Every structure is written in structure tokens, then in C-alpha cells.
Amino acid sequence: MTLQIRADTVTVHPERTFTIARGSSDAFDNVVLTVSEAGHTGRGLAAPSGRYGQDARGVLEALESVEIRDPWDLRGTLMANAHLPSSALCALDSALHDLAARRLGVPVYRLLGLTGPRPTTSYTLGIDEPEATLDRARELSRYPVLKVKVGGARDIETVREVVRETGAEVWVDANEAFAPDEAAEAVRELAGAGVVMIEQPVPAGAGPEAFGRAAGASGGVPVIADESALVAADVPPLAGYADGVNVKLSKCGGIRGALEMIHTARAHGMRVMLGCMVEASLGIAAATQVSGLVDYVDLDGALLLADDPFEGLEYEGAKITVPDRPGLGVDPVPEGS
């Protein structure tokens, strides 16, 4: 039977304007790759980010050139398409895993030889006015972990208030907000405020040593590299400077790339965080398949949405339930629903 390949753009909208150090957005374009053969269909999602020079139009065009000679040959197919932008490669990787697992009648995590995923995720608070952030944090008391975005020194006091008033475990994500000469002091203050983990305090371009100087001021609070660690090859240079790395499928090219990053980080004695973009649950479902291998789970991308074009994944508070059925466990919402 002829292999059919199709790519489509879907736009998802967060319930609230999502603001980080680099800017704000009310809409995010994802790209869905659909691969069908012999009565089975696999799907994968790309969540391109302008931070990495990618957008939906470019990803859509790239996926139109995908070559799949044998969908069972996952490794060979991914190697043949290694030139694709990382988020496009992620969509291909996820679609191939979804298709193979559906054909075999098993969930993807079983295809990978892993245990069933039941991760507990953090919930992300975008940058906002201090009182609005505090009000939102109080509303989210059912979530044991809150991740607070910061864009500069003015947000540190807000973080301190969130820690004081909610009783939640608080992580902080700076998204490269602090210049190398101010990052150490910012990290010191955040650690003193009682946060449990800090992400990417310095620009990735500042290099591992600048990252290490900032991390050295944390007093033992783990400092995790995100924008500094895109693929497995980025991990060894960070060893000894960062406490861990944030693995995102759209950064590293999908499930296979994520496994490479995880194993490389573990080989260097580093912690592992599993993150996501603001994306439909098809992308989150792919990430959950490897969630049993990590220390920190930040897979709330679909939880933040007002409109998710896929169904199957369930959030019960912070607990993510992935249906124990073939493939990634999610399917498009039927038209008209």
C-alpha cells in the first residue's frame, strides 16, 4: 500500500497571554505531520520557536521534502532526514514511532522498552504584574510545583512572595534574562528566596564558564541549562558548569534525540529535566513516553491551552495520564466536537 504523507499547520491559543523574558504571545503555530500506510496512521507534532530560527512556514516547507523509504526503519529514516530543522525532525520522529507502535498494537513507551508514564508536571506562570502573578499562584494551589518565569531583577521579589504565600515547590525560568555580570547575584537572591530549581539564568552565547559562575552562586540549588543545551553534543561542554539540562523534543529532534540527551547527561552525572513548548497534546504525549527517565517534568504546554486539537491525554491536577493504547495514545478531536 502506498505511503501517504501530509503536513498541516494548526494554531493553538493559551488561556492567558504567555509572557517570558523574550516577549509575549497569544497564539502559537504548531505543525502536524501525518504518515499513513496499510490502514494505520502515525502523527507527530513540531512546535517551532523563533528563538532557534524556526517558524511554521519553514517547517511545513521542510516536511514537504521528507523521504521515507521504509517506515519501519526509524533510525535510517531519521538519519536520511537529519538536515531538517529540529522541530520538523521531531514531528517525523514522533510520527514514525506512533505509526510503528500502532501497527504493533503497543504504546510507544513499550516499543522503547520503558515503563508506563504517569508523570507529575509543574505549572508555568508567565511574567505579569506582581499582584496578578500572586493571585494566579493562589488559584493554582492544587499544583504542587509552580514554575515562575522571570525577566529581570524586578521579578525576584514576586518570586519571593509566591514562595512565601503558596507553600508550593517553586522553580524559576529566566530564559537567558540576566547578563553574565548580574546573573550570579540574581541566582543568589533566587536561591535565598527559597526556590528549588533555576533554569537558564544567562544567555546561551555567554558560554559554559559564564553559566558556571552563575550556578556557583546558587548555594546548592540546581541550575539547569535550557537554551544552552539543544542536542546531546551540547551536554559534555556543560558538565561541571550546569547541574543539569532541559530536554525538549522540538529542540533535539524528537524521542530518539531526547534519549541521546538523557543518556549523555546521565553519563556526566547531570540531572535531567523534560520540558516542552506551548503546544498541542500530541507533542506532550510524545514527550511523556520518556518521562520515567528524568528528574523534573515540565510538560504543561497543552494544559495552558484554551483550545487543544487533540484528545486522549488527561491532566488530573498535575498528574498526566496517557491512555494505555497503541501509539502515542492521542487522536485529533473529531470535527464538530
Image (cartoon, rainbow, N blue to C red):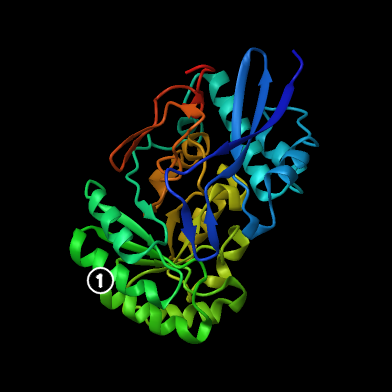
Residue 135 quadrant: bottom left
Tell me where residue 44 appears, x and y as whole percent: 60, 34
**Vertical order, 42 against 279 (above or below):** above
Q: Which residue is mark 1?
A: 194
Residue at position x 52%, y 34% from top?
Answer: 282
Tell me where residue 109 appears, x and y as whole percent: 46, 34
Drawn side of residue 108 relative to residue 206, left or right: left
SS class, disc 1 = loop
Neighbor class of circle 1 (other Cα within 10 Å; few <14, some 14-19, many 20+) is some
**Vertical order, 45 against 263 (above or below):** above
Question: The N terminus appears in which quarter of the rendering?
Answer: top right
The amino acid pointed to by label 1 is: Gly
Taking the view exactly as shown, the residue that stands out farthest to the bottom is 181
Residue 169 quadrant: bottom left
- Toward the viewer: 182 or 108? 182
**Vertical order, 85 against 281 (above or below):** below
Residue at position x 73%, y 43% from top?
Answer: 57
Tell me where residue 265 appears, x and y as whole percent: 49, 61
- Toward the viewer: 44 or 244? 44
- Toward the viewer: 204 or 22? 22
